[in-house]
Image (cartoon, rainbow, N blue to C red):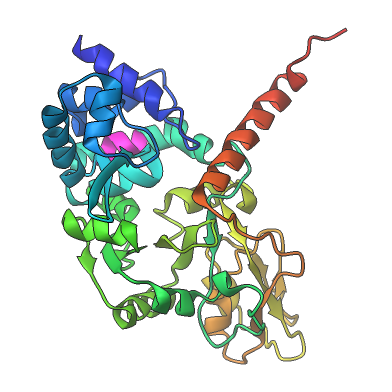
Amino acid sequence: MTEDAYYSLREFLDMFPLGFPATGSGVEIKILEKLFTEEEARAAILLTPFPGEATAIAERAGVDPAWLGTLLESMAARGLVFRVRRNGLILYNSAPFMIGLYEYSVGKIDRELAELYSEYYESAYMDEMGASDVPGFKVLPIGESIEDDMVLYPFANLIEEVRAARKISVADCICRREARLIDKGCDHPAETCLRFGAAAEYYIENGIGREVTADEAIAILEEADRAGLVHAGTNTRHLSNLCNCCPCCCASMKGITTRGHERHRYFNALFEAVVDAGACDSCEQCAERCPVGAISVVEGAAAVVERDACLGCGLCAGVCPERAITVHLKENIEEPFERVLALGAAIIEGKRRGREAETGGGHEDG
């Protein structure tokens, strides 16, 4: 049955670290029906998170390799599976809902799909994103106000990381495009979603994004900074993607700004803002600039930063007329994960611990 194909795909996607949980309304099935044909839904569950050739995938699944190869190439072009070219081989692997299917749909999203995404986010996905208490993103500031020697933490030097990338793409932010389609958008810049390396190649080859140079990418970051957007990449040492997040549309930011969730559920803050009380003139520009309301100013007193809420984005320092705010690496820095697989494993374990806590540790009373 057609319905069975989409339910099987939903269950498959729910096995990823950031899963694809069911809802009472079935809105998640409507999303899959909008994105996939029945044939594509059946093919998607033949893949794994690890890249493989179409012939090997077909042999393992017992299907015709010519049929599968043609279908997977078509699906890759439509943002339904991930494709990478390596050493003369074409390899395919499954794409999770996020980061994956959701972001890859930026070029084809319409009002109907935007409404489905919004409903799903509010009913299930915001909670799914924060369920593990393992932050999926790290925040990286740019600007002259960064005070620390980052020799020991090269992954924290955003500009140098961008300059070192072999390939860079930029695309519109899917979060802001979705919000605008349902008349809830903001006026922040749209073309701000950066990808690097293999991810950039995928975006460029499939027309999801366009190629840019390192200097162009840095200019995009600087414009985003002036617009008050937070630079956030996957919480790993290797830079594969970089979002520029607004507090009103961003999927992770909205958990903080609309639900009052703790920062750590979504973001690893490597830095923190530090106020020189003697130089602060209580102008309140920093408080107005802070995207998560982590700064307060009492008239006649210096600004105060709530350390547990501060993202370490540096946006406050950029508008301080007295240069009274600087951004420092945190003393007990929570280093990003070495690889995406390690991050995924930590998220799965965090979700398991959360479920056990909800059920009293999984043991019967008495």
Depth check: give the residue in front, 53 or 136. 53
Which residue is at the far right? 366
Q: Is residue 357 above or below residue 175?
A: above
Residue 188 falls in image quadrant: bottom left
220 relative to 356 in the view: left or right? left
Q: How many marks?
A: 0
202 relative to 135 in the view: left or right? left
Question: Is-magenta flag for residue 294?
Answer: no
Q: Is residue 175 above or below residue 197?
A: above
What span is in magenta?
A: 114-119
For the stretch drawn in magenta, the main secondary structure is helix
Depth check: give the residue in front, 278 or 230. 230
Q: In this view, does 187 lie above or below 300?
A: above
Depth check: give the residue in front, 325 or 64. 64
Q: Can residue 183 be seen in this view?
A: no
Q: Can residue 212 be seen in this view?
A: yes
Q: In this view, does 145 lie above or below 357?
A: below
Quarter the N terminus occupies: top left
Q: Residue at point 59% right, 85% down?
A: 145
| Residue 105: % across, % down | 24, 45
| Residue 133: % across, % down | 63, 43
Q: Residue at point 17% right, 53% down?
A: 206
Q: Residue at point 71% right, 59% down?
A: 308
Residue 30 falls in image quadrant: top left
| Residue 116: % across, % down | 29, 34
